[in-house]
Image: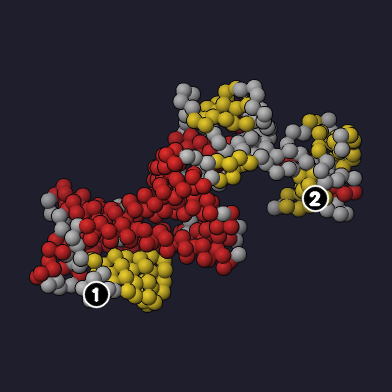
Amino acid sequence: MIIEAALAFLVTIAILIVVHEYGHYRVAVACGVKVLRFSVGFGRVVWRRQRTPDSTEFVVCALPLGGYVRMLDEREGPVAPPDLPHAFNRQSLARRTAIVSAGPLANLLLAVLLYAATSWIGVDEVKAVIGSPVAESIAERAGLRAGDWVQQQSADGQAWDDVRSMTDLRWAITQAALHRQALYLRVTDAEGHGLRDIVLGLDSADIGEIDAGLMQRVGIAGPFNPPLMGQVNPGGAAARAGLREGDLVLGVDGVAIRDGAKLRAMIRADAADGKAAPMRWQIERGGQRLELDVLPAVVEDGGQRIGRIDAYIGGAPQMVNVRYGPIDGLIQGATRTWEMAALTLRMIGRMLIGEASVRNLSGPLTIADYAGQSAQLGLAYYLGFLALVSVSLGVLNLLPLPMLDGGHLMYYLFEAVTGRPVSVAWLERLQRGGVAVLLLMMSLALYNDVARLLGLH
C-alpha cells in the first residue's frame, strides 16, 4: 500500500510538473526566447538530453518535487550580443506576461481535459438516495426522510440541474454553504414516485467550516442502505440473539426501521447510560416475520460507552454509472475546473480572514495517500484526483506571492501601471518575504498531514 501510494504520488507530481513547465517552455519558444534548460526535479542530474550545444538541455534530477525552465536572461549572467534579442528580459511586457502565465494556465487546461476524460470514461457513483437525516438537523427540519431520492437541485428555485449521484449532491451543498445560500431540492421516494420540493436553509444556519464534516452537520450522514444484517460474528450479541446474515430488520421496540444508519444509531445509543437494555427486534427472514430479543454489549469508544452487537449492519448502497457524451463531457470538464478554481480561491480567502481553518491546507503526505487510494479505485478516479491537484497547482501559482508565477505577474502589473519595472532592491525584499510565506505554508501543510495521520485532526 505504501509503495503504491508513493508511486502514484510520484506519477502525479511528475505529470503536473511536466505540464506546468512545458507551458512556460512552449510559449517562451513561440515568443522567440532561448530556453537553456528544461528541468524536472532539483539536485543531481540523473538523466540528460541535448541535441546540439546550442539547443535546450532537458534533464531529470534526483529530487522530483518541482521543476523549472531556465531562459536566457541578462540578469542571471552575460549574454552574447547576437543572443540579446532572445533574452527573456528584452521581451515586451505582453510576451513576458504570456510566458509566465502559461504554466498555471497549462495546469488548468490539463484539468479540463482530465475532468472531461473522467466524464467520458464514466464512474460508478453512489445514487443520491439519502439515509436517515441526523436528528434536529437542517436536513430533517427541511423534510428529508430516509430513502428520499434527490433528483434535481437549484440555487434559486427556478433553474434546475440534475443530480446524478451523491457526489453531485455533496458538491451542490458545498457550493450553497460557501455562498451562504438556500439550496432547493426536488426529491422523490426511492422508486421515483411522489415528487416534492424542499429547501435546505443553508443561508441562515450555523454550519461551521467548509470541511469533510459539512454533510454530517447539514444532516445528511450518508447514502441510504437497507437495514439488512451482514456478517454475524460468532459469540457476539447478534449471534446469541439468533440473528443471521440476510435478516431484514423491520422495527425495534415498535419503532419502524427504514435504513441501516438509524438501526446503528439506536444500537449505539442503547448504552448511553453505561448499561444496555434488551431490545425487541422485528425481522423478516425467508418471507416470515419473527421477533427476537437482542441485548447489545457495552463497549468503550472514544471515551463514550456505546452499544454493539458484533455484526455488520446495512446493505450496499445503490450505484449509478455517471457518463457524458463527447461534447457534454468537455463542457462538464470546463465547468468543473472553473468551479474548483473558484472554490479554491474562496477557501484561501476565508482562511486569510479567519472564517476557515488552516487545517484545510494539505501537503505531500495527504496527496500521496489520496493518490494511492484513487489509483486503486481505477483510472477514472485517479484522473479525477489528478485534475483536482492540477487545478490547485494552477490556482496557487497564480497567487500574487513572490517566488510564484503570480508574484511575477504582480511585478508586471506594477510595470504596466507605472511604466517602470520594480527596482532590484524591492525585488530582493519581496523575494525574501515570499520565501518566508511559502515556508510557513509548507510547514502548516506538513503539520496538518502528520496531525491527520496521528488522528489529531
- Compared to residue 327, the image places residue 446 above or below, namely below
Where is residue 93 drawn, in percent x and y?
Answer: 17, 53
| The N terminus, quarter of image | bottom right
Q: With 340 as the anchor, is 189 left or right in this view? A: right
Residue at point 36%, 58% (across, down)? 19
User: Which numbered disc flags the more N-terminal residue, 2 or 1?
Assistant: 1
In the image: residue 176, left or right of residue 110: right
Q: Quadrant of the C terminus?
A: bottom right
Residue 340 quadrant: top left
The residue carrying pointer 2 sits among few (fewer than 14), some (14 to 19) or many (20 or more) residues within 10 Å by Cα, namely: some
| Percent coordinates x, y for residue 409 in the rendering | 25, 53
- Would you say residue 180 is visible in this rendering? yes
Percent of width and height locating residue 370: 54, 56
**Does 58 sit above or below residue 157?**
below
Where is residue 20 shown, x and y percent of the image? 35, 58
- The image's mark for residue 231 is 2
* Residue at 10% from the left image edge and 69% from the top image edge: 82
Residue at the far left: name it: 81
Picture disc at residue 52: 1
* Left or right relative to 202: residue 395: left
Q: Residues within 10 Å of mark 1 (few under 14, many from 20)?
A: few
Residue shown at 58% from the left, 36% from the top: 218
The amino acid on which the numbered mark 1 sits, given as a three-letter code, is Thr
Specify whether 78 is left or right of 154.
left
* Residue at 34% across, 75% down: 48
Spatial CA span between label 2 and label 1: 67 Å
The secondary structure type at the circle numbered 2 is strand
Q: Nearer the viewer, mark 2 or mark 1?
A: 1
Helix, strand or loop status at disc 1: loop
The amino acid sitting under disc 2 is Gln
Q: Which mark is residue 36?
A: none
